[in-house]
Image (tube, rainbow, N blue to C red):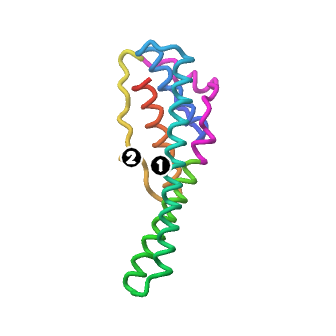
Amino acid sequence: MYKVKFNETEFLELIYFYFKNRSINNNHIASTDYDESYKRTMTKQLDSIENMIDNAKQDIISLNEQLKNCTDQIKKQSLQAEKLEKNKLENFFNELNQYLKNISHPPIPSTKIEFVLQDVKWDKEDIPEWDYSNCYFTGENYYKNLYITIYKMICKGVHING
């Protein structure tokens, strides 16, 4: 048994090639078809995130207008809290958008990734159940782990939906 360590980039490559190889071996799709499906899916995801950013910006503009016209202190505090949450949401989507843009093109497999995946028994291997509950949400890596989990779910979606 081998022990292999991955940096973040290699881990993302492993995720991509795990689902690509699984699709090729189990769904019998061509390598180029998976790559094209991945590109389409990433484009859709990035467009969706851009829309969420735009919606958050519009909400912030609306909240600013409401704050300007508000005279009730309790209501004003509530609006300020809501604005703060919208700002956090906008920042999150901006960071996620940038993270996914950096990995939106299919990677090239490294020798390390090929080595790790060479012994997978594709006909017996079950897809891991990856969702938000599998993510480590602690400390300084909270958002990075969330972004990686979202990436896993995107790659799994490409595999399932083709």
Residue 108 is one of the magenta-drawn residues:
yes
In the image, residue 94 lies at what x, y percent? 57, 54
- Mark 2 and mark 1: span between their CA atoms? 7 Å
Residue type for callout 1: Leu
Secondary structure at badge 2 equals: helix
Q: Residue at x 47, y 26 (%)?
A: 19
Q: Residue at x 43, y 54 (%)?
A: 137
Above or below, 70 relative to 95: below
- Residue 104 figure quarter: top right
Above or below, 20 relative to 51: above
Q: Which residues are magenta?
A: 98-121
In the image, residue 53 lies at what x, y percent? 53, 54
State the residue position of label 2: 132
Secondary structure at badge 1 equals: helix
- Residue 72 figure quarter: bottom left
In the image, residue 93 lies at what x, y percent? 52, 53
Q: Residue at x 52, y 56 (%)?
A: 92
State the residue position of label 1: 146
Question: Mark 2–mark 1 contact, CB under 8 Å?
Answer: yes
Q: Earlier in the sequence, mark 2 or mark 1?
A: 2
- Residue 109 figure quarter: top right
Above or below, 50 relative to 6: below
Residue type for callout 2: Tyr
Classify mark 1: residues with Cα within 10 Å, few (<14), some (14-19) or many (20+): some
